[in-house]
Image (cartoon, grey):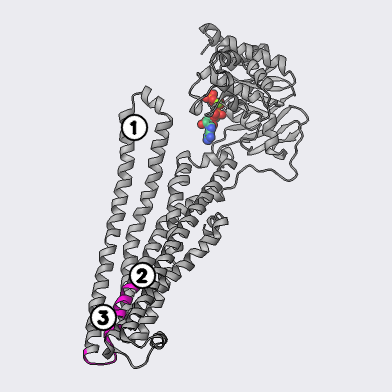
Amino acid sequence: MVKTLAKSIREYTGKTVATPMVMIGEAAMEIFIPYVMSLLLTVIDPSDASEHSAWLQVLVERITSTQIGQVALYGFIMFLMACLSLLFGVLGGKLASEASAGFVANLRNDMYANIQNFSFANIDKFSTSSLITRLTTDASNVQMCFQMMIRMLIRSPMLFLFASIMSFSIAPDIAWIFILAAAVMALGVVFIISRATPNFKRMFERYDGLNRVAQEDLVGIRVVKSYVREDHEIEKYRDATRQVYHYSIKAEKWLTAMTPVVQGIIYIVMILVLGFGGSRIINNTGLTVPELTALLSYSTQILSGIMMVAMVLNFFAMSKNSADRIAEILEEKSTLTNGENPVTEMKDGSIDFNNVSFSYKKDGEVILDNIDLHIASGETIGVIGATGSAKSTLVSLIPRLYDVAEGSVKVGGVDVRDYDLKYLRDNVSMVLQKNVLFSGSIKENLKWGNEFATDEEIESAAVAAQAKEFIDSNGRGYDYDLGQGGVNVSGGQKQRLCIARALLKHPKILIFDDSTSAVDTRTDALIRQSLKEQSPEVTKIIIAQRIASVQDADKILVLDNGKVSAFGSHEELLRTSEIYREVAESQMKGGDDNG
Ligand SMILES: Nc1ncnc2c1ncn2[C@@H]1O[C@H](COP(=O)(O)OP(=O)(O)OP(=O)(O)O)[C@@H](O)[C@H]1O
Ligand SMILES: [Mg+2]
């Protein structure tokens, strides 16, 4: 997981490495200040001087011999160190925030790029809300954790180490108290963290739920309103926030115990140091008052160093879940990849299903069962079948939105798995049943089909899709803004734009999955008519609920529960297929074939 994520550091490696270095500099300054302070105190009260002089003392005495001069010089050195410490601290903070923000920006982009590579099967695996949580909340968690780690994870142990060395050099017997206290504190902190972490983990899981509720509700807000389900949705959201609240309170409860425990231990240590140190000074056993002040500073540094390490580890534990969930996205391999030497030439638009079986999940329910079907190039095929009879599933295998479980699908005599994926999908144009337009103008949306399309090509596609009339009458023509998800057009207009978009690809195979369900019968017939005239060589597959939409087709496929029930012309099927006859009769009798 660490390895996967670390790949996204890239150009921020320099800053990531520099941060801990600078932080070590800051720690060093913090260690030396108490030391210089103790030397300064020795100048003020020379009776406290220990037997041997330190190098700094020798140096200072050489520069000036007056007491006041030495005090000023030590003061100046301390001032310099404080400035340096401040400088290092600020620089470290700046570097750390730049490194972490840059790293996470890369991380988000890498995740997003991989998600775009996902196949339909990959997308089925992760829910949209979970993907959004991973791109937002999880990435933010990792950013905070990363920043804290590069700032503290090396600095704090260093501070601990330096301070320990200094205190042992001053008074080994007292320094032992620090180590003992540090051990006790580490135990206490680990205990607290072990209590808090599982609750944090649960809290983050509830975030997923929170996002799911919000996302689902907001995407479907119109449906919510039309069914007057607002109160129900508010309650659902309230429940989700309550869950997050519950676990964050539980987790925070333990964390709030941390500061008092740490403070308590620091005070106890100070009392012990003052007690032992004081008695040693009174008994004149080699400890001086300045040394005791230095020891007190070091004790605080050692213990806060431990606390910092613990905090970072705690953060790490909290963010580990987020990091794992991000790594999951980065490591997810698309289930559809190009083979070696992918084919980039399609002979014609013939389609062969050779004993194809399919299920959405491995060893799951069989959706398509042993389909054997052969369609010649240029034919028009209608597909009819009850809802859930696997019409959409069947056609999704042709542009390889999913891979077959058994058998093979061939286009132009070549297995679809052998084609270059982009080439295949450019030549097999499919108007999905659940189609969407994106914010932007009509022209921008149509150009998805072919980014190099000229205005004439766009116009001719619009004419064929019977979309020209309403485009011309909207006042802004092809620059008309569709709004988010294409809210600014009617259902039937949207379907016609989707058809125009698919036509612009100039494919060898065109698939309409219930693409004219919201279009009136006359326009529907006009669309089929112009397709027939404009692109006679293109193989067309038309899935429809209305017999009228398919009865002119060369052949009609009747699907029943994932199996081919009948395949033939309208007249043949009226004679041979009971299912087809029933559907045809019911639509004829109703007289209204609009629905
Ligand atoms: N992404 C998916 N993951 C799992 N199961 C799915 C998925 N899509 C469809 N199914 C299942 O596959 C079966 C066939 O669905 P499909 O969408 O192919 O039917 P359909 O004939 O197109 O129906 P409709 O006329 O309503 O569009 C259904 O039982 C459905 O539950
Ligand atoms: Mg369908």
Q: Nearer the viewer, mark 1 or mark 3?
A: 3
At label 1, the amino acid type is: Glu
Q: Residue at x 70, y 30 (%)?
A: 427
Is 405 included in the stretch rendered in magenta?
no
Q: Residue at x 27, y 59 (%)?
A: 256
Which image quarter has ligand 2?
top right
Cα–Cα span, label 2 and label 3:
18 Å
Cα–Cα span, label 1 and label 3:
61 Å
The answer to whether residue 6 is left or right of residue 306 is right
Q: Which mark is residue 173?
A: none
Q: Compare marks 1 and 3 and give the one earlier in the sequence.
A: 1
Q: Nearer the viewer, residue 393 or 232?
A: 232
List the residue tagged with mark 1. 233
At label 2, the amino acid type is: Ile
At label 3, the amino acid type is: Val
What element does badge 3 sit on?
helix
Q: Where is residue 452, by image quadrant?
A: top right
Cα–Cα span, label 2 and label 1:
46 Å
- Seen in the picture, residue 393 relative to 3 is either above or below; the reply is above
Farthest-out residue, right: 347
List the residue tagged with mark 2. 306
Q: Nearer the viewer, residue 225 or 418?
A: 225
Query: Crowding at label 3, few (<14), some or many (≥20) Cα neighbours within 10 Å?
Result: many
Q: Compare marks 2 and 1 and give the one earlier in the sequence.
A: 1
List the residue tagged with mark 3. 273
What element does badge 1 sit on?
helix
Q: Nearer the viewer, mark 2 or mark 3?
A: 3
